[in-house]
Image (spheres, grey):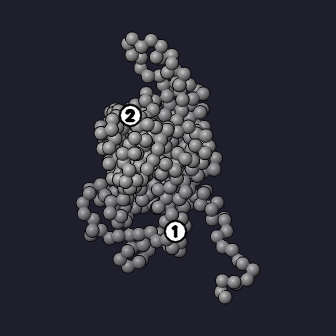
Amino acid sequence: MPRKLQVGVLFGGRSAEHEVSLVSAASIIDALDKNKYDVIPIGITPQGKWLSSSDALQLLKSGQQLDHQPEKILLPDPAHKSLVALADGASQGASLDVIFPVLHGTYGEDGTVQGLLELADIPYVGAGVLGSASAMDKVVAKQLFRQVQIPVAPDLWFLRKDFTARGKAIVAQIERKLGYPCFVKPANLGSSVGISKPHNRKELAEAIELAAQYDRKILVEKSIEHAREIEVSVLGNDEPIASLPGEIISSNEFYDYDAKYVDGKSTAIIPARLPKSVVKKVQEYAVRGFKVLDCAGMARVDLLVGQPPPERPGRAGVRGLAGKKTNKIILNEINTIPGFTSISMFPKLWEASGISYPELLDRLIELALERHREKSSLRTAYKPKTDWYKR
């Protein structure tokens, strides 16, 4: 019998998306083939404490004080490759063959944990440091998308301290360049946390105040009214492939946190009812965006596809005029650790494209190992002609 791979599933974390991570991790742990893998749950509390035990997931879900739980950490020293007990420094269990990070948002999806795993020399699922960081920062991501001619919504951004210093001028610039309604977002967060859709100046001020609670960098985007919310899943490393697209029908004015996870009223249409030419284009943009951000393993790409506004009585010709812009595609954002809950689009889109949930997890682990092997073949040392540095 071949040895089972030791797979650490890393979840929780210091993020506003902590709870979403717990639900995603539960789905992954349940679906991983126990004949192939020994699954090691690794939970991180909202305060940053690392725990690892068979009941780590339930402990984090309970929300109880966990000060009495023994803390285990991952050292950046590549000699260990396993969790180490903080109390005595002893290694805990077999070496980890691969880590499956399910940390949504900051301190997990932004390159921080990926950097630790690189130092520890442990293969891991998903994008590396650069891909994670560039995708997490919506401002940086949009600048890169524009470099490869991927359409994005008109926007502007500013720092929290800039708004404190010259808020009236920034509001005037937003109204002049973008107008209402618009979207106000923390530049580095997901699951629609901290996002608002203001319709006037009063709501804009409230939206900026909310976003500033989560990030020092604020992004404001023009609202693409009447657009369809389309999502595409991407899988692969250097030669990624795109799934069939799906469409989200939000239960709220936009696909906010409650519409995604709480009220259960949003629906998904898989595959999305789009012309073949549009399907091909959204897949092309998804793969191109994945590559320009230097993503790896997986990502969910969120796009907007324009459609005519609903006809109003007494306004003849509105549909024909708006129809000229029908099916215009805009890339909204890329999520490098997409949701893996039972209702998440990433696995559902691949299922519709012919890859089951367990097979998808197998492929992601294989991609992680493949990328690690390639990186391990590179030289990390250089022997100079003389020992000049010893002089």
Where disc 1 sits, the SS reads: helix
Relative to the observer, which residue lies in front, 287 or 23? 287
Q: Residue furthest right?
A: 385
What residue lies at 48% left-to-right and 48% top-to-bottom?
138
Taking the image as shown, residue 111 lies to the left or right of residue 181, namely right
Taking the image as shown, residue 214 lies to the left or right of residue 308, namely left
Tell me which amino acid carries mark 2: Pro
> Where residue 75 appears, x then y in whole percent?
46, 71
What residue lies at 38% left-to-right and 56% top-to-bottom?
161
Relative to the observer, which residue lies in front, 300 or 255? 255
> Where residue 16 appears, x then y in whole percent?
35, 53
Asked if residue 68 can be seen in this view, the reply is yes
Asked if residue 348 can be seen in this view, the reply is no
Looking at the image, residue 350 lies above or below residue 298: above
Taking the image as shown, residue 186 lies to the left or right of residue 3, namely left
Whole-Å distance between the Cαs marked 2 and 1?
46 Å
Looking at the image, residue 75 lies above or below residue 21: below
Looking at the image, residue 183 lies above or below residue 64: above
- Residue at numbered disc 2: 181
Where disc 2 sits, the SS reads: loop
In what quadrant of the picture does the N terminus appear? bottom right
> Where residue 359 appears, x then y in whole percent?
52, 46
Looking at the image, residue 315 lies above or below residue 294: above
Relative to the observer, which residue lies in front, 276 or 365? 276
- Disc assigned to residue 120: 1
Tell me which amino acid carries mark 1: Ala
